[in-house]
Amino acid sequence: MNIAIHQPNYIPWCGFFAKMALCDTFVFLDDAEMSTGPSYVYRAKIRGHHDDAMWLSVPNHRQLGQTIDQIEVVNSTWWRDHLNMLRAVYGKAPYFKEIFSFIEPIYRSKEKVLMNLNIQLILSIANYLGLKPEFKRSSDIHPAGFSDDRLISIANILGASGYISGKGGQKYQDPNKFAAAGIHLHVYTYPSPVYAQANQPFVAGLSVLDALFHLGKDAVSVLPDKSQLPMPIND
């Protein structure tokens, strides 16, 4: 059983869902300490009005030492601004109405806890794309340790034999620790796809919503399948 673990980001990019497509169990790392600096937990890139990208940020209140599951949304009208911006940028995209129909109610629910908002959006998108790993929250698992020790703890608690890491994980993950714990470490580098963006120059690294608005269910074609899981680096 292969596991992937990631913070519950706000309308994340396609690479987030690529790890989900490769794993059997996906864990939201919701009890990690929240950064006091810029974070994908509360912001994402969408298409700009020109050949560029712009940020959509969910206003929130953060204090040093708080975990992600403790962060609350502030400003009761932010969701309306985000919906209006998505409508202005993507309103003419081929699948705008189809996608907007299932994300709009989540925004209108006015969820107060940032993590809950993010997870609701992620699960709705995963369901639309037909991605069906088992979903867990680390706060329900109560893992021990920090950094890669915490990831190993989660994997052990859930009985995972493999852990799927992104390229960035190599900065702090020790392959020998995973090997000692009997866990295969798979490092997957997502090759950012190029797809049609309304006949405009392609902009990479945008929220998965960009691919959904332009491709609909065919957005799953920019994700890998389990046959593309790389060999472990610690065998």
Image (cartoon, rainbow, N blue to C red):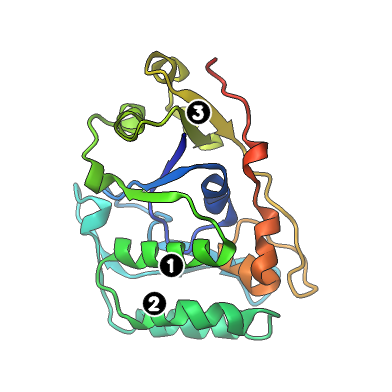
Tell me, yes or no, if residue 229 can be seen here: yes
Identify the image quadrant of the C terminus. Answer: top right
230 lies left or right of 160: right
Residue type at numbered disc 2: Ile
Check the image and name the residue furthest to the right: 199
Q: Which residue is mark 2?
A: 106
Vertical arrangement, residue 204 with respect to residue 212, above or below: above
Q: Nearer the viewer, residue 54 or 70?
A: 70
Q: Nearer the viewer, residue 123 or 16?
A: 123
Q: CA distance from mark 2 to mark 3?
A: 35 Å
- Upstream in sequence: badge 1 or badge 2: 2
How many labels sit on residues?
A: 3
Residue type at numbered disc 3: Gln
Q: Where residue 44 sits in the image (x, y, percent)? A: 49, 63
Q: Are marks 1 and 2 in contact (CB under 8 Å)?
A: yes
Q: Where residue 126 sits in the image (x, y, percent)? A: 51, 61
Q: Which residue is mark 3?
A: 170
Disc 1, SS: helix
Residue at 39% in and 13% down? 180
Q: Where residue 170 sits in the image (x, y, percent)? A: 50, 28
Disc 3, SS: helix
Q: Which residue is mark 1?
A: 121
Vertical arrangement, residue 174 with respect to residue 165, above or below: above
Tell me, yes or no, if residue 52 can be seen here: no
Q: Where residue 145 sits in the image (x, y, percent)? A: 24, 29
Residue at 56% in and 43% down? 22
Vertical arrangement, residue 173 with respect to residue 216, above or below: above
Disc 2, SS: helix
